[in-house]
């Protein structure tokens, strides 16, 4: 009798244990794409919770940066509409343009397509969230973020990975970015202020530069440069030619926009400016031009490596930024690198 009771007790324990394990696997155990049961929730850069009941299968992107990230995550086939600035990778040109840009986009086509998810930069919410509210009322989840801000790039990749159910791929991209961030930081972190060259960073028009509070200033600090305009009172000031001449930058870095002359001509025009002819950067030929696409999203590691090598050529003598750009282009977009993105 005792033996029978013992066997029954053992069987009951086994059944209870197995049932608990099965329930855990069904309802609690994490897997690729998040929890098996329950909604998917992330928080965007505006502090808004974005909720989906399952990974998004259809997406409209009103952000060229996030369009690139979605392709890098292997989910380009889920994009069913885009803004006119989303032109990379080339495959996205086959997608219909549903809005010229993200600021006050026309909603008729978006509502007609009714994607699971719409992603955009912060221009979408400049109207006190009215556009967002309209889309959400129609059952469209809206995720807002910025891919041109280094502080947000990795967060955005992780969040898109969750929303699309591809967390492993997102982590692969984040690890790739962090590996090059570490290379830069390990080499510049112990520099004294006197060892950081004076840099003048010019944006898309003459004498438009960056100060504390701007993305460009953070990037210059990150790569070991000393921003000549750091202490000016606004993040994106317009300075005088005399200001730059007096600060005597050792390095000049200029952003190239689509309407600018080609790289060699733009560089020569800068070096020919009367106010700059006597500064160290011009006298020593240390004037560099870059495509701003290098400083956002998945391509950001190539951008910081270019800047780091221009500013500290001896510390980064063994680094080939173009090779890294080629690597990430093939790895994340399946494309051979074409065109010029930095000069010289």
Image: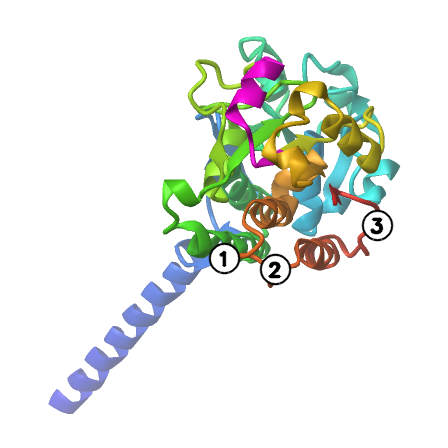
Query: Residue 338 shows which numbered tag?
Result: 3
Front label number (1 vs 2): 2
Q: Earlier in the sequence, mark 3 or mark 1?
A: 1
User: Crowding near pointer 1: few (<14 within 10 Å), some, many (20+)?
Assistant: few
- Which quarter shows the N terminus? bottom left
**Residue highlighted by disc 1:** 183
Q: Mark 2 points at which residue?
A: 319
Please say if the residues under marks 3 and 1 sit with CB atoms less than 8 Å apart. Answer: no
Identity of the residue furthest to the left in this view: 2
- Tell me the crowding category of disc 3: few under 14, some 14 to 19, or many 20 or more residues within 10 angstroms, Cα based: few
Q: Say which mark, if any, is on residue 124.
A: none
Q: What stretch is highlighted in magenta?
A: 238-252
The first of marks 2 and 3 along the sequence is 2
Q: Do the residues labelled 1 and 2 touch (CB within 8 Å)?
A: yes
Q: Label 1 vs label 2: CA separation? A: 10 Å
The crowd level at tag 2 (other Cα within 10 Å; few <14, some 14-19, many 20+) is some
Determine whether the residue tagged by mark 2 lies in a helix, strand or loop. Answer: loop
Q: In which quarter of the image is residue 195?
A: top left
Mark 2 vs mark 3, CA separation in Å: 20 Å
Kindly identify the residue that appears in the image at 84 percent across and 46 percent down.
Answer: 339
Left or right: where 54 falls relative to 115: left
Residue at image coords 27%, 79%: 11
């Amino acid at each position: 009798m005792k033996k029978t009771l013992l066997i029954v007790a053992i069987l009951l324990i086994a059944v209870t244990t197995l049932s608990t394990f099965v329930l855990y696997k069904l309802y609690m155990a994490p897997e690729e794409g998040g929890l098996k049961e329950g909604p998917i929730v992330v928080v965007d850069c505006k502090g808004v919770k974005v909720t989906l009941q399952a990974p998004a299968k259809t997406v409209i992107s009103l952000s060229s940066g996030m369009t690139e990230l979605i392709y890098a995550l292997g989910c380009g086939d889920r994009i069913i509409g885009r803004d006119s600035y989303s032109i990379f990778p080339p495959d996205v040109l086959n997608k219909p343009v549903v809005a010229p840009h993200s600021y006050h986009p026309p909603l008729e086509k978006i509502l007609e397509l009714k994607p699971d998810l719409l992603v955009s930069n912060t221009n979408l919410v400049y109207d006190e969230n009215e556009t967002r509210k309209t889309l959400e009322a129609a059952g469209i989840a809206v995720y807002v973020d910025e891919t041109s801000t280094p502080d947000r790039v990795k967060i955005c990749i992780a969040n898109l990975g969750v929303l699309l159910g591809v967390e492993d791929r997102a982590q692969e991209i984040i690890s790739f970015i962090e590996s090059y961030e570490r290379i830069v930081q390990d080499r510049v972190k112990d520099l004294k202020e006197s060892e950081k060259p004076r840099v003048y960073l010019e944006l898309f028009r003459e004498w438009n530069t960056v100060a504390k509070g701007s993305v460009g200033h953070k990037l210059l600090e990150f790569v070991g440069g000393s921003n000549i305009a750091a202490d000016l009172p606004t993040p994106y000031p317009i300075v005088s030619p005399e200001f730059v001449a007096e600060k005597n930058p050792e390095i000049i870095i200029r952003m190239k926009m689509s309407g600018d002359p080609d790289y060699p001509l733009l560089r020569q025009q800068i070096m020919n400016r009367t106010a700059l002819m006597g500064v160290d950067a011009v006298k020593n030929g240390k004037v560099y031009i870059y495509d701003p696409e290098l400083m956002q999203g998945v391509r950001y590691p190539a951008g910081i490596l270019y800047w780091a090598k221009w500013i500290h050529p001896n510390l980064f003598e063994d680094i080939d930024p173009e090779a890294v750009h080629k690597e990430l282009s093939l790895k994340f977009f399946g494309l051979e690198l074409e065109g010029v993105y930095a000069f010289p």
